[in-house]
Amino acid sequence: MAYSVEGQLLEVCTCNVLCPCWVGEDPDLDYCDGLLGWHLDKGKVEGVDVAGRTLVMLCHIPGNILKGNWKVRVYVDEDATEEQKNALLNVWSGKLGGPIADMAGLVGEIVSVEQVPITFEVQGVNGTVKVGDGIIEAGLAPFKGATGKETALHDTIFTTIPGSPAYVGKASHYKAKAPGFDIDLQDHNAVSGHFKFEA
């Protein structure tokens, strides 16, 4: 087995609630600028222990998500060793195959890879994420149905956590300041969930 990783996803984007990208429709603004963050509670990649590590992508998706050509800036938490960083990049670039490889195939260009401080906190299915010194900041909470359970998407044509339900909700705030990104929004799309990827 090349890798087995498990943890939490937090995602926020510039689309309104709910993001059309998950069902293969065009984004609300003709583009989608999103943060996708995965925190690994446990896992190994080709024998390298990556528990506790976090990888975040800041993505510019220029049209329909399934047409690809994404431009992404990748952030790995500053405490990751070089070996851990390379292991994560091998998984999320699709080099090691598995369930994340389809999403990785939509990336047209990795603009940069940086190691910075990352705060990634999940309480239930609520979450907050902060990347670097003012690069990204977001907070999110899921919607709840009539039974009190969190509203979930299953079997969508696109997902950042293949094989797992995605809990849809709203971001109280979403800020991103990086070359090509200048975002300061409230009450836009948010997604959270648990993932387990193996290959």
Image (cartoon, rainbow, N blue to C red):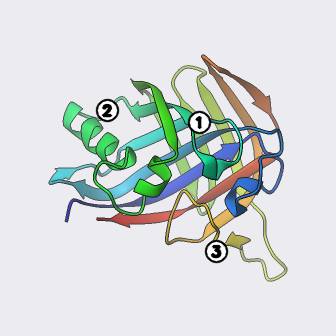
Going from N to C along the chain, the mark reached first, 3 or 2, is 2
Q: Give the residue drawn at x 71%, y 63%.
A: 23
Q: How far from the left and from the top, in percent, is residue 30? A: 80, 39
Q: Give the residue drawn at x 66%, y 27%.
A: 176
The residue lying toward the viewer, choosing from 176 and 158, is 158
Position of 155 with respect to 150 (left or right) is left
Q: Check disc 1 and report the residue beneath it.
A: 59
| Residues at marks 1 and 2, CA–CA distance in whole angstroms | 23 Å
Q: Give the residue drawn at x 57%, y 37%.
A: 70
Dot 3: what SS? Answer: loop
Q: Check disc 3 and report the residue beneath it.
A: 154
Going from N to C along the chain, the mark reached first, 3 or 1, is 1
Q: Residue 79: which numbered mark, if any? A: 2
Quadrant for the C terminus, please. Answer: bottom left
**How busy is the neighbourhood of tag 1: few (under 14 within 10 Å), some, or many (20 plus)?**
many
Among the 4 quarters of the image, the one containing residue 143: bottom right
